[in-house]
Image: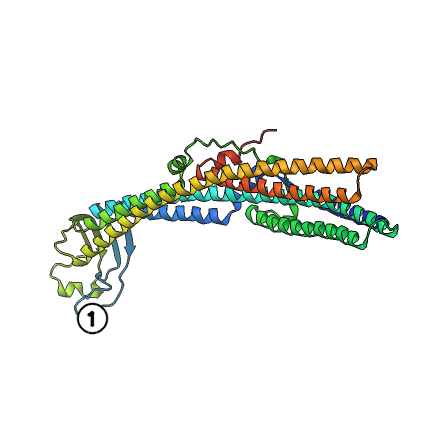
Amino acid sequence: MKFRFNLIVLSTTLMLAGIRMHAETVPLARAIQLALAHSTSSAVANADVQRTFAAYRELHNSYIPQLVVGSGLGYSYGFPLTLEGSAPSLVNVVTQSTIFNPSQRQFQNAAKTEWRAAQLQDKDQRNAVIQDVTITYAELAKWDARLSRSHEDEGEASRLENAVVQRLQEGVDSALDLKRAKLTTARVRLRITEARGSADVLRRHLSTLTGLAPSSIEIAPDSIPELPAVNAEDDMPAKAVASSLAIQSSDQHAIAEAFRASGEHRALLPSLDFAAQYARLSTYNNYDRFYNHFQPDNATIGVSFRFPIFSAPQRARAQGADAEALKAKKQAEAARDKVSEETLKLQCAVEQLAAAREVAQLEHQLAQSGLEAAQTRQDAGTGSLHDLVDARGQASERYLAFQDADFEYQRARVSLLRATGDIEKWALQTPSK
């Protein structure tokens, strides 16, 4: 049985070595860069920036004369009637532009402000991608380390199980002791299955983010920069409110809605537009029969002045825009309160998780020291095999607890870095060696 177990371990090692030969070691900074270039959410946010910029340019360009060339060819019987509002003509050239329009100016300011809000959302989405990649990377490192440790535990558990079998045959141990040894081995194999499944899921998610094949991803845990210390006296909520891209985007949206409401009110003010038209007319449309002074070339140039006297629908539209502006303003205030509250919770959670991580680390160190002492006694012949099994099981459990506590601390700390606007600077730095 021992030879069979060694053969299985050797085969697994060779298989993993063959996979790693084709794998690409991807440091955290490289994974983030690939994700930023490949992320669909970043592409959507960038498309929104382009859309809002195009909307701003559309309103801005209304002050540039537009030129349309067309033709209204058609046969006229009797008086020459219009075709879609224009006189029948061989060539028709129309140009027009806005000269003075208070409403248009405010709508243009609103579109420009919405463009700025979209840019801030794009940056916020960039930080969200960095956070997602970092947490996925750190969790994958956790499960890979657990899988490696569990394979070592599996070898030790199998060795101890074989020893119990021999002791049972010699009459030293009982069948109950063998069941306990088998249970220990089964628990280790359960942890291996859990770790392998979790690592596969995380590697697949990292593949989706980066665009790399899952089988070609080999992480480098040492590439994760050291997390900066948190000073309990620092006012993290105030820092988060000052640097939050979500708050800035909400503020810009509220300003845009205020501009839009002002534009709806200013739609009741006078406006002035430039317009010009040239038309080449023909005799087969009967112009020479119904007009005393017909000439084929005709042109008109001038300005169009509009003064709205009364418009109940426009006043109602302006009141609705006022309500939207007030709503956006209150949403911006709510976003500010939410960020402040969530950041305070994160700061408190980081302090608690740091303490829990320290406790778990000390318990792991004590359990590891107990395992080493039990192994020493076993080698010297003064300790029992069951004491060694119990010590090894306790050390494994404490190791898993420390891993979980360490990752939860990393997750909360990375979330706090994003909240305070420091995540990109931290994640893309060169880790200290």
Q: Is residue 3 visible?
A: no
Question: Coloured how?
Answer: rainbow
Kindly state the secondary structure of the residue where label 1 is placed: loop
Q: Which residue is mark 1?
A: 77
Which x, y percent locates residue 147? 68, 45
Nearer the observer, 244 or 288: 244
Residue found at x 29% / y 57%: 70
Residue found at x 62% / y 43%: 401
Report the number of discs: 1
Which x, y percent locates residue 107? 26, 47
Nearer the observer, 195 or 122: 195
The reply, left or right, for residue 99 in relation to residue 110 is left
Residue at the far bottom in the pictured view: 77
| Occupied quadrant, residue 283 | bottom left
Nearer the observer, 307 or 403: 403
Amino acid type of the residue tagged 1 in the rendering: Tyr
Nearer the observer, 10 or 171: 171
Q: Is residue 241 visible?
A: yes
Which x, y percent locates residue 4? 83, 50
| Occupied quadrant, residue 108 | top left
Residue found at x 63% / y 50%: 200
Residue at the far top in the pictured view: 433
Q: Say which quadrant the C terminus sits in.
A: top right
The reply, left or right, for residue 300 in relation to residue 159 is left
The reply, left or right, for residue 45 in relation to residue 9 is left
| Occupied quadrant, residue 234 | top left
Which x, y percent locates residue 9? 78, 47
Label 1: few (<14), some (14–19) or many (≥20) C-alpha neighbours in 10 Å: few
